[in-house]
Image (cartoon, coloured by chain):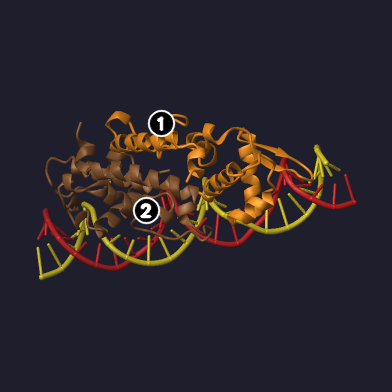
Chain colours: A brown, B orange, C red, D yellow
Amino acid sequence: MLSKKTKYGLKALTYLASQTKREPVQISEIAEHENISQKFLESILLTLRNTGFLGSKKGKGGGYYLLKDPSEIPMTTVIRVLEGPIAMVPCVSLNFYEKCDDCPDENKCSVHKLMLQVRDSVLEVYRKNTLADLIAG
Amino acid sequence: MLSKKTKYGLKALTYLASQTKREPVQISEIAEHENISQKFLESILLTLRNTGFLGSKKGKGGGYYLLKDPSEIPMTTVIRVLEGPIAMVPCVSLNFYEKCDDCPDENKCSVHKLMLQVRDSVLEVYRKNTLADLIAG
DNA sequence: GTTTACCCTATAGTTTTAGTAGATTTATCT
DNA sequence: AGATAAATCTACTAAAACTATAGGGTAAAC
């Protein structure tokens, strides 16, 4: 299951990307428009800012804004920041690899074999979708 | 992340499928061979039995055994029983559909659009992989 | 009567999803 | 310049849900 954090984060990014003007948008506006708890969204936007996706401005007229063009934000990067590893088991993760402690030999592991395929196919979807693709249509 | 329940369940099924003789295998044997907590595995095998994948026999010489040929057990069915919905959000789930309460229009939802693609691509992997495919090689 | 699956309960631990309280920065108004 | 309001930022807390187990007893088969 996708966490609400990721879901809300994606919606917020989409909302920011669909703005005609690239001016700061307040948390409250995003929260209201996307039906998200404002305080929860606050922490999500903060991590998106700390990871280089968003810029922010304090005080009156402040808010959050995209730092890059939506077409240059692939879903792989967003998902990894919000949801964590794309792989369903650490032993097939590209960026978060970890050996299973119960598994003596990965190459003979059925779960490993299956989840490699799942990872590859999901990765392909995330790679070919940028933020721009999500707002199109 | 894949739950350990699913991981262990898959490993247990694989172990049963790789048996040369189709005779009951004890929980303890599976648990030991696959490095799984026996008590935990017990409950997993029980759900696999209650959902029609395994048969069981009590008493001496008892244990669990596959009810079908491994080539007739697609991963879609196994994953749905052990892990739950394959879709990452209920609003794109085929078997566990639920409307998002925060989303006024699914067709305009960026998360929906993205997760539809993810679902389709994962589904394809699970559909083409049967238990027999996992033990081959 | 021994061996095995079956069933029920509890529980520690972690993760998720927030809520609360206040501090800090910026813009604007007087 | 100073006050005020508007916004982000930071930290702490907490309820709820889920995960992964353990324990103990029951029932069936041999």
Are the residues flagged by discs 1 and 2 from a single subunit? no
The spot of residue B113 in percent (x, y) is 30, 34
Q: Secondary structure at mark 1?
A: loop
Amino acid type indicated by mark 2: Pro
Quarter of the image for the N terminus of chain A: give it: top left
Closest to the observer, A41 or B11: B11
Amino acid type indicated by mark 1: Lys
Specify the subunit that label 2 lies on. A
The spot of residue B29 in percent (x, y) is 67, 52
Write the residue at 48% across / 40% down. B133
* Residue A41, numbered circle: none
Mark nearer the viewer, 1 or 2: 2
Write the residue at 30% across / 38% down. B114
Write the residue at 68% across / 52% down. B28
The spot of residue C30 in percent (x, y) is 11, 57
Q: Quadrant of residue B17?
A: top right
Write the residue at 54% across / 45% down. B10
Mark 1–mark 2 Cα distance, whole angstroms, equals 26 Å
Quarter of the image for the C terminus of chain A: give it: top left
Specify the subunit that label 1 lies on. B
Q: Is residue A97 left or right of residue A48?
A: right
Q: Quadrant of residue B67?
A: top right
Q: Is residue B27 left or right of residue A67?
A: right
Residue where numbered disc 1 is placed? B99
User: Are there few (<14), some (14-19), or many (20+) residues within 10 Å of tag 2?
Assistant: many
Residue A63 shows in this picture: yes
The spot of residue A123 in percent (x, y) is 31, 46
Q: Secondary structure at mark 2?
A: loop
* Residue A85, numbered circle: 2
User: Are there few (<14), some (14-19), or many (20+) residues within 10 Å of tag 1?
Assistant: some
Residue A29 shows in this picture: no
Q: Quadrant of residue B45?
A: top right
